[in-house]
Structures are given as structure tokens and as C-alpha cells.
Image (spheres, rainbow, N blue to C red):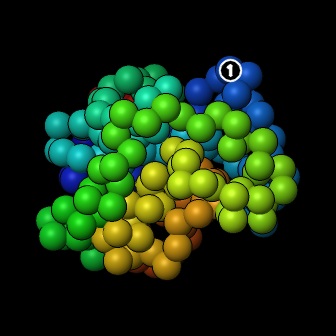
Amino acid sequence: MDLQAGDIFLTYQGGFIPRCIRAVTKFWSVDNDADYTHAGIITSSNGSTFEARTKTGCYHISDFTGVPVLIGRHKLMTKERFDRGMKAVARYEGAFYPWWRIALYLFRPLAKYSTGDYLVCSEIDSKFLWGCGLLEGYKGWTPDNLADMVTHWKLWDIIHEGENNV
């Protein structure tokens, strides 16, 4: 797989919390579809990632081997943009995942305006893209919003969609 720093990925794994995330994002989804429940940033061609899990930090895309994954690349991504984006999210490294914020997505305005600067995984991705100068805002974004962006916006290429084999 041709991965580059600055690609973003979305994935779905089973479990209680992912099922809750999927149900809430599907409820609010314009296209009534929400396949993905987790988001992260590819930080190198070897598959290293930066993402919000139990703790926000560096992981690897191979942790999602065998599960559905969508990987997208913005056509205007450069090394300079990537560096600016990573600078925008670097302060979250080591932060614990704000699980309590997931409930705020039942009432979307609360999720958007009541962050307290505690970001869920999809907001880490969207803040990265905001820092790159490729997105206007970052609060309130969901994995479904990011998936719709990758699959429908003209400045995005789909690098991979299907079972992760990295």
C-alpha cells in the first residue's frame, strides 16, 4: 500500500463503544450511513500513525489488520503542510481519551461547542487538517464526516478502501 505522511485513515472495529459511536453518527448522518468509528493520521510511509486511543499518541496502522479501513489523501498535502498539521495536534500526545465527550454527540451543538479542548479521535484528524490549512474548523467532526469528505470531496483521493492488509 502506498502510504504517505499526511494521509488520514478511518476504521471500524466491533465492541460496545464503536457500536454506540456508529449509532449516534448514523442518526445525524445526511446520507444515513456511518461505516467508520475511529480516525487517525498516517505519519510515515511505513504505516506509523498518530491517533487518539486510550491515550493519544503514536501507533501503527497494522494494529487494524483484517478490519475495514478507508485511507484518504488530500491532493494539496505537502511536507510543509504535514509539519504544520502535526504541530497543531502535538500538544495532545499523552492525553487520555475523553470518553465522556461521546455522549455530547447525541446533541451535536454540544459536541461542537463544549469541547473544553478535549478532542476525540476524529477531531484530532480534523484539527490536523485545520493546521495544514485544508479545513476551516475542527470541533464536532465525526469519523462519518471525515469518511464522507474523503469519498465525496474532489480534492481527496482514496488510497485504500477495504480490509486492511498492512
Q: Is residue 143 left or right of residue 9?
A: right
- The residue at the point 28 percent across, 76 percent down is 76
Residue beneath label 1, please?
A: 15
Q: Is residue 151 left or right of residue 24?
A: left
What crowding class fits label 1: few (fewer than 14 Cα within 10 Å), some (14-19), or many (20 or more)? few
Please state the horizontal and vertical placement of residue 26, each as a whole percent of the image: 78, 50
Please state the horizontal and vertical placement of residue 80, each as a whole percent of the image: 15, 70
Whether residue 8 is situated above or below residue 100 in the rendered picture: below
Q: Quadrant of residue 132?
A: bottom left
Please state the horizontal and vertical placement of residue 147, each as a whole percent of the image: 56, 56
| Between 139 and 152, the one nearer to me in the picture | 139
| Between 31 and 43, the one nearer to me in the picture | 43
Please state the horizontal and vertical placement of residue 159, each as a whole percent of the image: 35, 54
| Between 45 and 151, the one nearer to me in the picture | 45
Is residue 145 among what the camera can see? no
Q: In which quadrant is the C terminus drawn?
A: top left
- The residue at the point 26 percent across, 59 percent down is 87
- The residue at the point 71 percent across, 42 percent down is 102
Q: Quadrant of residue 66?
A: top left
Secondary structure of the residue carrying tag 1 is loop
Is residue 140 among what the camera can see? yes
